[in-house]
Image: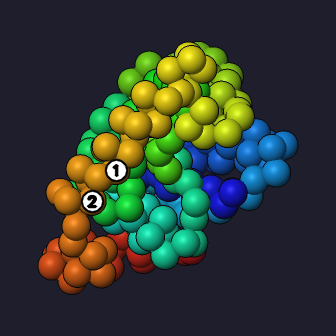
Amino acid sequence: MRIALINENSQAAKNEMIYASLKKVAESKGHTVDNYGMYSADDKAQLTYVQNGILAAILLNSGAADFVVTGCGTGEGAMLALNSFPGVLCGHVVDPSDAYMFMQINDGNAIALPFAKGFGWGAELNLTYIFEKLFEGEPGGGYPKERVVPEQRNKKILDGVRAVTLKQDLVEVLKELDQDLVKGAVAGEK
């Protein structure tokens, strides 16, 4: 699996720590990580959490990434931004059990983490544990396991609802957005 890491401006200074933790866990499970920045608070290309959503949608819908890890101060804004786009199903993950259950029950393709709220002493340990649980087992396997059939049925129902409510093609969505916002989302080094 190809995993994209995207950081926005308020938490850009933490990119190196997040990337190191994600890369260590992902590579141990045979995955690849691409770091799309922001790499530091001083980057020329400044991303907002809304632009994280745009970039995530482009990467996922184009096949450049299979999964996106992003966030913001609380993780809430990034989650909402990503879920605004077709082809993106983003969960808000605060701890390892959130990560495990999101993948086993909801089988999404992106997570948004809080990189400020609750991100204190031992934060790098929590990140490692989150990433370990996130990529444990086959996605959609159910939790608890005996609930796999109704959970998979509910996931298909959700996918059907999203196909109706988010039916506009991503290219058409991008054309209708403020072009400076879109250009800013893809202005980074990668």
Please, is residue 73 above or below residue 126 in the view? below
- Image point (27%, 59%), residue name: 163
| Position in image of residue 84 (x %, y %) | 25, 55
Helix, strand or loop at mark 2? helix
- Spatial CA distance of label 1 from label 2 is 6 Å
The answer to which of 112 and 158 lies nearer the viewer is 158
Kind of residue at badge 2: Ala
Q: Quickly name the residue at label 1.
A: 159
Q: Quickly name the residue at label 2.
A: 163
The reply to whether residue 115 is visible in this rendering is no
The answer to which of 99 and 188 lies nearer the viewer is 99
- Image point (53%, 60%), residue name: 37
The answer to which of 116 and 151 lies nearer the viewer is 151
Kind of residue at badge 1: Asp
Please, is residue 107 above or below residue 146 in the view? below
Contact (CB < 8 A) between labels 1 and 2?
yes
Is the C terminus in the top left, top right, bottom left or bottom right quadrant?
bottom right
| Position in image of residue 38 (x %, y %) | 50, 58
Q: Tell me which corner region of the image, top left, top right, bottom left or bottom right, holds residue 28.
A: top right
Helix, strand or loop at mark 1? helix
